[in-house]
Image (cartoon, coloured by chain):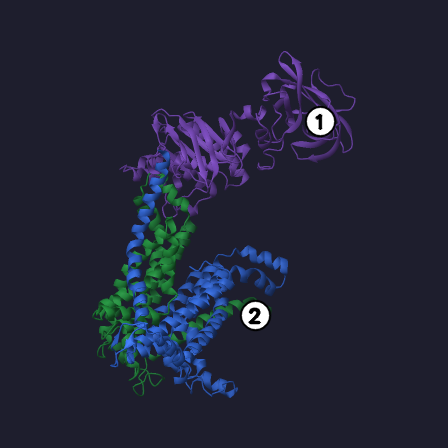
Chain colours: A blue, B green, C purple
Amino acid sequence: MTIAAAVGPARRRARIAYLLLLPGIAWLAIFFIIPLISLFFTSLQVSTGSSGKYKAGFNWRNYVEALSEYWEFFLRALIYAGFATVLALVIAYPLAYFIALKAGRWRALMLVLVVAPFFASFLLRTYAWKTILADDAVITQTLNALHLLPDGRILNTSIAVIAGLTYNFLPFMILPLYAALDKIDPRLIEAGSDLYASPFTTFRKVTWPLSMPGVVAGTLLTFIPAAGDYINAELLGSTKDKMIGNAIQTNFIEFRDYPMASALSFILMASILIIVTVYIRRAGTEELV
Amino acid sequence: MAWLRSKLLGIVAVLVLVYLFVPIAVVAVLSFNNPEGKFNVSWNEFSLSAWGNLCGVAGVCQSFILSIEIALIATLIATVFGTMIALALVRYRFRGRGAANSLIFLPMATPEVVLGASLLALYLNLRLPLGFWTILIAHIMFTISFIVVAVKARLQGMDPRLEEAAQDLYASPWQTFRFVTFPLVLPGILGAALLGFALSFDDFIISNFASGTTVTFPIFIWGAAQRGIPVQVYALATLVFALALVGTVLGQIVSSRRRRKLAASS
Amino acid sequence: MSEPRRATPVEDLNLVKLSKIYGGLAAVDDLTLTIPGGSFFALLGPSGCGKTTTLRMVAGLENPTSGQMFVGAQEITDLKAYKRPVNTVFQSYALFPHLDIFENVAFGLRRRGVKDVTGPVERMLDLVELTSMARRKPGQLSGGQQQRVAVARALINEPDVLLLDEPLGALDLKLRRQMQIELKRIQVEVGTTFVHVTHDQEEAMTMADTIAVMNQGRIEQLGAPTQIYENPATAFVANFLGQCNLVPGQITGGDGDNAVLSANGFNFSVPRSRIHAAGSSAILGVRPEKITMYWADEPLPAGHNRLEGTVTDVSFTGVSTQYLVKVPWGQELVVFEQNLSLEELSRRGEHVQIGWAPGHTFALDGAEDITAGMGSHVVGA
């Protein structure tokens, strides 16, 4: 009798949990999972000859075509996103560290300022970089005077695209880094500087490993959207800087070549999943969220 | 030199913040510009004409209001659903918990183009008319995960003994939620909702797939970019940013004042 | 002053064959226990002994694997936590940070639909001397004040049983002493049964009428503090409650009230009432403070147990001095001497006699492990 009593509440609790999950999970199942499946079938459709009209089939050649036609776009997306992620990490870390461990009473205000750019239009901010990086702007003029620019300009080069990606996804790097650094007991860092004396060794042996969950989460939250982005390439790059996102967008919306766009989407997702899995294994953490 | 070394980190931190705000400052400055041609990209002369006539360009205010409507409804629904999921994931043990966790994470690990493309593939297959509802559905979908993550973090930071104490003090499960869990998690939920609103209001990539001929504010900007973005758009964007910033900063100041006053009275 | 003492008589708390099994391991193992109504009862044991699990089962925060629980005649085994006539003072208090002190204390009454809470809350705050703090938030109170709020918040519901989970663990030593007296006063004043879980033997002995020493999910010994301290029944209890000298031997005979226990060729007398051995194999026990040190040529009181030895270590602790004395079979016995005399302390290497009254000797069963409970208690707490 008492055993049944012990099992009863547990079962009832599980039922409450399922009820709580139901609406949200159902929403995601219907509008995320089913579309993905639908996208997969679309990626195998066969052309009927007329634009925008396709019929069901298992045309695996779509994938071969997608890869042979757009492999450079994939490569660029991964390379640009990779550069942007590393740059964002380097830029975000000092700020996150400062907010978590040194900011004192300024901490709350600084966090607000980190999130604030979300409230200024993403498109307009990217557009603003056109003004900042323009050929006759201060930055370009200065760097040109120092002969640091191979093309003599920034705008409409891959540098501008990478700069734009770095800028746009920076808050997604700062916030998880901050969350991880905030959990570190400052006494550990003090103990580290007591043991290792040099600040650099302390950082390498204590702070960096302890902030690893934040580094992993931050790099993923930066890399994934950056790899799929097409706004920065469209607005800041030249036609030679287009990324896979551009290819998916144009194929879907302009060419209405749905099977091609779907195949490209699946290849992008698969490559991201592979990179992420390998990366998480290497970084040795399973706790992403 | 020693002073510089001790302050170096702080200086770098402030520089990074400045970097975050440079393009926003450019937008704000350009909202007071009277552009030379149709492209509002470089400074010409000071003008208040856009601010004096925010809806002066056809379609700009309609799209702005539409975006606010969608963001409000999407945030409300996603916050309710997301908070429920977060509660279930943190407070209950059940079969399928791992799968539910993955399902929450996956949309965040999917590039927006793929989310947009797949939704459009579904809409096309179902022959759903594109517009307000298809945008709303998409926004709720991609906002839920962010809400779950934010609320989950807050719930995990909460001492589980507080809920046990409530139960011990005659609070039924519902009362425990109503009088203890909810008020303690509320700041986290509000923060998450604010983020959700910003993500939805500003979304272009997914909306562009799901919208058909309906024009949200970001879609309006994108469309206008070819023939020159009207200065009104800069003014509206600056207005939203300023309101959000002033609102949150004031909120911070008020709550820290209150905290300090309480501390002083003890 | 209004009298907060409860009107209804206090019921006993009965635990019957209570077990809690986690993944094949019994945290609480077939526990049967009666806690008399109105008593101050301590569950004492090292961490992991099952005391907190027992408490959580009584509170309804954990379901027992088997067994039953009763308050008086009412079975509470399957009753939800929020329906039990039991309240808890949590470890580190678990005060609601978003509610002020008044609302924290009023919480239980409000949940049960009591309309006018002002009177009872004010009386309760008066009892714990926090009337002036009513509108503060918990974060603005000191540790000791928070502790008293936690007690008030639980007691206002007039529970049949008040559970206290390591209630003083978060306080510093001085405040802890103060709160021990304070809690005892409150308990006498309200008359409710207090069940106090602690790993601190001194705290248990100071406050409780009855102590149950728990080890590995079972109760080792139950009794009044003096009884279990002076006459421990197991090596675990002997070692866990303070220090103890234990010497394995045999019961070889005796006369009248006293038995003779011989160990390593020496004979000691032990009162028969203090023998806990089933057979003749036994362990001699005597606490360090019962032993007196004598100079080598000094006469001992008649009938005292006596040994000769060499001082191997002296440590002065202020109130007393702790000596280690090496006895003929090589064991080092611990001796506490109060620093009464103005004479010089004995020195290391000095030859001395030690002796104690037979009435302070006890004998444990020979099968006991003489190291049980060592090192698991908190030194100097």
Please indicate, yes or no, whether residue A104 appears anywhere in the rendered image.
no
Residue tagged by mark 1?
C341
Label 1 marks a residue whose chain is C
Residue tagged by mark 2?
B4
Name the kind of residue labelled 1 in the image.
Ser
Question: Quick check: do tags 2 and 1 share a chain?
Answer: no
Q: Secondary structure at mark 2?
A: helix
- Report the front residue among B200 and C146: B200
- Quadrant where the C terminus of chain C sits is top right
In the picture provided, is B99 more to the left or to the right than C113? right
In the picture as drawn, the residue positioned furthest to the front comes out as A58
- Quadrant where the N terminus of chain C sits is top left
x then y, percent, for residue C162: 41, 33
x then y, percent, for residue C77: 36, 33
In the picture as drawn, the residue positioned furthest to the top comes out as C256
Q: Is residue C14 above or below residue B141?
A: above
Name the kind of residue labelled 2 in the image.
Leu
Q: CA distance from mark 2 to mark 1?
A: 65 Å
Please indicate, yes or no, whether residue A53 appears anywhere in the rendered image.
yes
